[in-house]
Image (tube, rainbow, N blue to C red):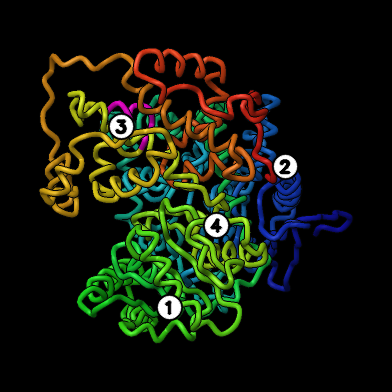
Amino acid sequence: MFEGLRFNHWKTSLDDSGIVTLTLDRANSSVNAFSREVLDELGQIVERLAIEKPNGVIIHSAKSNGFAVGADIKEFVEYAKHGTVLENIENGQRVFEALARLPCPTVAAVHGACMGGGTELILACSQRIAADDDKTRIGLPEVMLGIHPGWGGSARLPRLIGALEALPIMLTGKALSARRAKSLGVVDRLARPEELMAEARALLRHPHARPFAQRAGAWATNTWLARQLLAPMVVKQTAAKVRKEHYPAPFALIDVWKRGGSDINQRLKLEARSVAKLAQTSTAQNLIRIFFLQERLKGQGGGVDPDIRRVHVVGAGVMGGDIAAWAAFKGYDVTLQDREMKFIQPALDRARALYEKKLKTPEKIEAASRRLRADVEGAGIANADLAIEAIFENAQAKESLYATIEPQFQHNEILATNTSSIPLDELRKGLKAPQRFLGLHFFNPVAQMPLVEVVRHEQLDPAIEKRALAFCKAIGKLPVAVKGTPGFLVNRILMPYLLEALRLYNEGVPGPVLDKQAKSFGMPMGPIELADTVGLDVCASVGRELAPFLGLELPPGLEDRLEAGKRGKKDGQGLYTWHDGKPQKPEVDPDYTPPPDLQDRMILAMVNEAVSCLGDNVVDDADLLDAGVIFGTGFAPFRGGPIQYVRSEGAENIRQKLETLAKRYGERFMPKNGWDHPALKQSGFELPSGA
């Protein structure tokens, strides 16, 4: 059937029953990503299939880690640079539409990750079967890159499963498990992994008939009237989560669906033009850059065995307890130490709740719970490969603890501190093996925050740093190596922002106004709500440590609140009153007019310190700085990080704003060391180094 045709990325076979199997195996790549060459080869194959008319076609992947991860993002960036996105989107649409129009049945056999273009490929098949396995994940995550599905995803999925189910999948970008995909009708059948191909052949012979009610329900939500009625509701729900001016892609997707009629070609044309337009936005360019930054952080722990099997955590408070719970969740044997069992038990209870939420089945929950053990006496230290200290922020207390831990080490164990602000040069003074001591600074809440700062000092053994980076990767975190100066990276940059917000609060600016201004810039949470969430006691503790170093002052009134037991969310009282875990923000006088430079005072305080960190070489380069601040603070992702923000706004422009603020409000706003750094002079969209 394919005599004379040679393919680099596809393998083809024809069996005795007239069924063709197409196996995707992208050459020289560990994963299947759709490059132009991969698509063009598929186009040639489909063209031949249309002529030969086999009895059926099965499409699957030869990669053990999954079906396909989507489009080749690096190629997409090149298309965006050269203005050829539309042409290449339309090319992919033509290939998938030709597949959809084949006169024979087609079945996609899915295992592992099936994302973006991979999902759009399987949607172009007649039917889909998925491996019933935890590793199977099916999704359309393009919105996370500032675009939306462009190879038929928005044209086909709403018609397959109904708009009410399809739109949230595309608007959130969240992947579906195999069973969820089956229940929604995204896949027609599940199979045990080892029986996937045999079951795919069975599905070709006996196609799965979707229930009439399911077909009718999908049709009803896509009529012209339904689209006109539902679209404004979906827009309203989306606008409650993200701003259109910050993240245009979800709104563009809703509009494409709203305007799409019964003709697939018309729907595809709308989809392609919309994606081509979105690709030119700074939001898409910055989110794509962040995607590569994330991949770079993931890769930092690659290729190294952390040689860690057992973990011991000292300090069962919120941070220590949750670090221990997360490590056990990720498969490590963990012992958790504190002075008495009454301090450890709440951490065990929180861990149990985490496992029940994440793991679902009783067997997995019990297994994770067994891996986390209370250890009041600290017996686990002697057998641990990694000991993490997570006690309160007091240098003397930490040094005393290390004096009891270090003598119990047997060989090449790592001692780590979760300190959020104390310089490591200070903490390592009394250690006999400072080369095996470093910081592993997690962020609260541990289960949600992806970043871990791997904190260096001058005597750290590079091999130990690599093991620490690999450990972070093993527990599913994004590590960034930082210099062990006060506050490291994230807290050093965040503290001027929080302190300036608290200063404004003391000046009489209502908390809700400050929060609203920060969120309008793109921060995920306002600074007043954030201070309460982190805890005013933590803010004060870190502030006391960092304020002298940063040339700042703690705002008055903070200590009074702490003495009154008003630490924020955990006490139900702080800068706000909290009820059921939510802040009760007071009403603001509608006639209140905020100061015009309010946003600049908060944001530029943070940006100025970010540039100072760059000048002080706190991280290895500007890309890692942006990655750390985005994943550690949630800094407006669509802006690409503080350094990318400086580039887009112009370094000289922001510097002048800081000088104006300094004249008006004081020396704390004077541009710091680092404003002459060459990284600030880059312009336009560039992929981060290493991408």
Span of residues in magenta: 516-523
Mark 1 or mark 3, which is nearer the start of the sequence?
3
User: Disc 4, disc 1: CB below 8 Å?
Assistant: no
Mark 4 or mark 2, which is nearer the start of the sequence?
2
Specify the amino acid type for callout 2. Answer: Arg
- Mark 3 surroundings within 10 Å by alpha-carbon count, few (fewer than 14), some (14 through 19), many (20 or more): some
Specify the amino acid type for callout 1. Answer: Thr
Instruction: Say if the magenta span includes residue 376.
Output: no
Alpha carbon separation for disc pair 3 and 1: 54 Å
x, y percent for residue 330: 45, 71
Secondary structure beneath disc 3?
A: helix
Occupied quadrant, residue 691: top right
Please name which of the two marks, 3 or 2, marks the residue nearer to the observer.
3
x, y percent for residue 184: 37, 57
User: Disc 2, disc 4: CB below 8 Å?
Assistant: no
Secondary structure beneath disc 1?
A: helix
Residue 404: numbered disc:
1
Q: Give the side of residue 375 with respect to residue 621, left or right.
A: left
Residue at position x 39%, y 81% in the image? 371
Specify the amino acid type for callout 3. Answer: Ala
Q: Give the side of residue 205 with respect to residue 173, left or right.
A: right
Alpha carbon separation for disc pair 3 and 2: 35 Å
Nearer to me, 347 or 186: 347
Alpha carbon separation for disc pair 2 and 1: 60 Å
x, y percent for residue 337: 34, 77
Query: In the image as oriented, which residue stretches furthest toward the right?
Result: 4
Q: Which residue is mark 4?
A: 114
Nearer to me, 317 or 87: 317
Q: Give the side of residue 108 with respect to residue 396, left or right.
A: right
Please name which of the two marks, 3 or 1, marks the residue nearer to the observer.
1
